[in-house]
């Protein structure tokens, strides 16, 4: 394929969103060039889902996403829903399974999703060049000019699909955000999301010795009516030497605001039963009256954790029949409304995604094009749309890439 004098679109970024957009646009007859600075493409796909890529979620809907504009992603998700990508995966003969709550993983390897994307690009005769560093992008009266070390490429459209800031070791960069600022497009301050939370030594002193314990909890974070709002998740929590992790904590981290506490109900289960209800059940049972506080608690949580809560309440080795009403209520509150302020997150190296990014107010949700810059598009993780854990962020990559490809 010869190099055209002017490309229909140059896509910067050869990850999930960039490659999918390129393949779709190429198959529509567009002349597409993909540029990426990485030696190996698709690394974030390859390492995702423990190497099996949680490529979508059957329940992906706007309710599973954070954005300062919660309506922005509706059009893209409606036009290219999860079932559309599932159909494509099936068409390529890739076997997959549902792991938990709609989360779909490859049976064999994430490499199958990478191969699918490359084959889609091949069908569209997409040219992919890497490693190539883009030094500048300029707008002229008639087209866009993309400057690289190998020369200048002219194009009718530029698509920024460079992802977010997590995992710098595999080439994450702020390229799309820097370019947005260059063109006076507002950027919501990026922050690590779906990431473990760290605590001060004082706040975590009693829990540090319990590292390795995992249990289902209800965890609340965020501020209702402010920023990204608030949410509660009924998921597993994992105690580590550095703080709190596990699916529930990763989910809560996306909503958590600096300086604010999170609240944990240690007795709530995955079915969503309030911990206060379970507390009343186990502690009002006659059969438990002569048992010690920690042994009653150990019927619903690991013994080491039960002992810690009993000790904190001054009830260790004390029979429940001997515990006064005020002490009972204090224990109930500490178990079901445990509030603690995280010191921070464990940062970009441990984050799965980025919260924040290009402000959606500056983009057209039906095309992903910048409203004041015709021919400039932003797709995928660099946009202020962040999915919950479980394949939703990949679905945003596919959906935003689709509407962009069909508007080029």
Image (cartoon, rainbow, N blue to C red):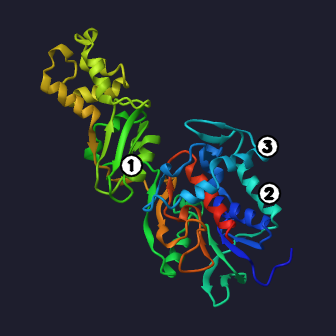
At 27% across and 32% down in the image, what residue appears?
335
Q: Sequence order check: which comes first, mark 1 or mark 2? A: 2
Please tell me which residue lies in front, 147 or 377. Answer: 377
At horizontal 82% and vertical 61% (from top left) the residue drawn is 123
Disc 1 to disc 2, C-alpha distance: 39 Å
The x, y position of residue 350, in whole percent, is: 49, 52
Q: Is residue 331 left or right of residue 380?
A: left
Q: Secondary structure at mark 3?
A: loop
Q: Is residue 32 visible?
A: yes
Determine which residue is flagged by label 3: 93
Confirm whether residue 294 shows in the render: no
In the rendered image, residue 408, in percent from the top left (x then y), is placed at 69, 72
Residue, far right: 1
- Is 339 in front, or is 284? 284
In this rendering, the answer to whether 108 lies above or below 289 is below
* Residue 68 vertical position relative to residue 135 in the rendered view, above or below: above
Q: Which mark is residue 226?
A: none
Distance CA(mark 3)–CA(mark 2): 13 Å
**Residue at the location (13% across, 27% down)?**
326
Q: Which residue is mark 1?
A: 197
Residue 134 relative to residue 108: left or right:
left
What SS does tag 2 mark?
Answer: helix
For the residue pair 202 and 367, the one nearer the viewer reads as: 367
Label 3 crowd (10 A; few <14 / some 14-19 / many >=20)? few
In terms of image quadrants, where is residue 209? top left
Side of 221 relative to 113 (left or right): left
- Tell me whether the residue at label 1 lies in contact with that at label 3, contact meaning CB atoms closer than 8 angstroms: no
Residue underneath mark 2: 119
Question: What distance separates the C-alpha of mark 1 from that of mark 3?
Answer: 39 Å
């Amino acid at each position: 394929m010869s190099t055209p004098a002017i490309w229909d679109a140059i896509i910067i970024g050869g990850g999930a969103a960039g490659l999918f957009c390129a393949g779709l646009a190429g198959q529509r007859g567009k002349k597409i060039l993909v540029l990426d600075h990485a030696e190996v493409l698709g690394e974030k796909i390859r390492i995702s889902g423990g190497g099996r890529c949680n490529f979508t979620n059957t329940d992906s809907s706007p309710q599973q996403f954070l954005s300062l504009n919660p309506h922005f992603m509706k059009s893209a998700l409606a036009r290219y829903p999860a079932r559309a990508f599932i159909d494509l995966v099936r068409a390529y003969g890739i076997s997959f399974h549902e792991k938990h709550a709609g989360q779909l993983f490859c049976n064999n390897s994430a490499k199958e999703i990478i191969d699918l994307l490359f084959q889609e690009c091949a069908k569209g005769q997409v040219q992919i060049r890497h490693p190539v560093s883009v030094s500048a992008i300029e707008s002229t009266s008639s087209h866009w000019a993309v400057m690289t070390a190998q020369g200048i490429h002219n194009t009718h459209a530029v698509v920024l699909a460079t992802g977010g800031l997590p995992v710098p070791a595999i080439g994450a960069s702020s390229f799309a955000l820097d370019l947005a600022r260059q063109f006076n497009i507002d950027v919501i301050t990026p922050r690590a999301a779906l990431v473990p939370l760290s605590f001060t030594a004082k706040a975590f002193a009693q829990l540090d010795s319990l590292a390795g314990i995992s249990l289902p909890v209800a965890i609340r974070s965020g501020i209702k009516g402010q920023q990204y709002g608030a949410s509660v998740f009924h998921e597993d929590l994992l105690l580590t030497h550095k703080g709190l992790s596990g699916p529930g904590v990763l989910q809560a981290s996306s909503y958590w605001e600096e300086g604010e506490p999170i609240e944990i109900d240690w007795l709530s289960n995955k079915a969503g039963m309030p911990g206060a209800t379970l507390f009343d059940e186990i502690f009002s049972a006659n059969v438990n009256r002569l048992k010690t506080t920690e042994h009653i608690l150990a019927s619903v949580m690991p013994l080491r954790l039960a002992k810690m809560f009993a000790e904190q309440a001054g009830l260790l080795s004390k029979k429940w029949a001997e515990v006064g009403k005020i002490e009972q209520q204090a224990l109930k509150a500490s178990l079901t409304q445990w509030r603690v302020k995280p010191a921070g997150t464990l940062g970009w190296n441990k984050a799965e995604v980025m919260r924040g990014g290009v402000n959606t107010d500056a983009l057209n949700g039906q095309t992903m094009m910048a409203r004041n810059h015709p021919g400039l598009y932003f797709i995928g993780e660099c946009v202020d749309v962040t999915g919950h854990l479980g394949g939703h962020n990949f679905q945003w990559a596919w959906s935003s890439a689709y509407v962009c490809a069909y508007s080029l």
